[in-house]
Image (spheres, rainbow, N blue to C red):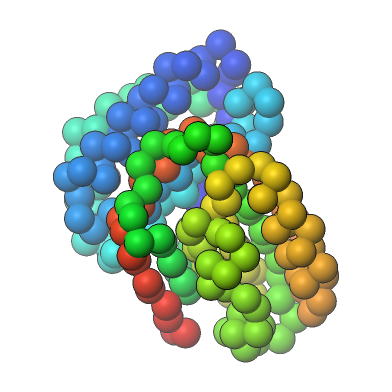
Amino acid sequence: MYRLGIDATDRARFTAEGQHNLLTSHQTEPGTLAMLATHADAAGTDNFIFEVYRDAAAYDVHAKSPQFKRYGQVAQQVLTQRAMTELNPKLLISPKRELRLTDDPVPTAVLLQATVTGDPTTWMARQPLGLTDGAMLRYVATTTDQAQRVVILSLYPDRRAAQKALTAWQGRLNVNTTNFAARLLTVDTMVCHADVNFETTV
């Protein structure tokens, strides 16, 4: 999970290069399971990027790809801030159809982060983490540097559905958690293979 800051004047170039990177990777890298480029603010200067790989070898393929190197060159020129949070995937569920680019209306993602009191695996088992609330995709992970810090990314078909889901999640995540944070993210580009159903308790 990357949080990237840019100047508003660089947004068009940054978004176009990110779109090329994501779409090309989706087409040519079977081990790249899902990628989402989103922004949190109206100007599009506060960006969150999510990348999910089948394994370390799949990540290595992407890191050495020409489209990533091209994207990296542009990023070096336009980024004003950069933070990376390495995640341990626990769950990834995608729909029966693959996700590419954006739908109409533009999908909205809900990013939830909370520190769980107690065993995070037990806590997650008690949450409705399927796609039963209208989500198009759900990704759940813990951070590598803090095993009790849970990150939940859910994709909804529009902002209204996302806001409704966020309200419901806020009630649940205020129980047995601390340091709760929530954001609505507008999707710029999304790619995900169809019918991914990955879950681990490790």
Write down the quadrant of residue 52 in the picture.
bottom left
> Which residue is at 65% across, 78% downward?
127
> Which residue is at 54% across, 52% downward?
155
Q: Nearer the viewer, residue 40 or 99?
A: 99
Query: Is 40 left, or right, of 174 in this rendering?
Result: left
Give the percent coordinates (x, y) of residue 18.
39, 31
Query: Is 174 left, or right, of 90 in this rendering?
Result: right
Q: Nearer the viewer, residue 196 or 33?
A: 196
Give the percent coordinates (x, y) of residue 14.
44, 23
Write down the quadrant of residue 128 in the picture.
bottom right
> Which residue is at 50% across, 63% downward?
139
The extreme top residue here reads 9
Q: Is residue 11 above or below residue 181?
A: above
Q: Is residue 170 above or below residue 157?
A: below
- Image quadrant for the C terminus? bottom left
Query: Is 65 left, or right, of 72 in this rendering?
Result: left
Query: Is 38 left, or right, of 119 in this rendering?
Result: left
User: Number of labelled discs?
Assistant: 0
Question: Is residue 37 visible from the viewing direction of this image?
Answer: yes
Q: Is residue 188 above or below residue 155?
A: above
Question: Is residue 144 visible from the viewing direction of this image?
Answer: no
Q: Nearer the viewer, residue 194 or 172?
A: 194
Write down the quadrant of residue 24 in the picture.
top left
Give the percent coordinates (x, y) of residue 150.
62, 68
Give the percent coordinates (x, y) of residue 169.
73, 64
Q: Is residue 180 above or below residue 101?
A: below
> Which residue is at 66% across, 42% downward?
159
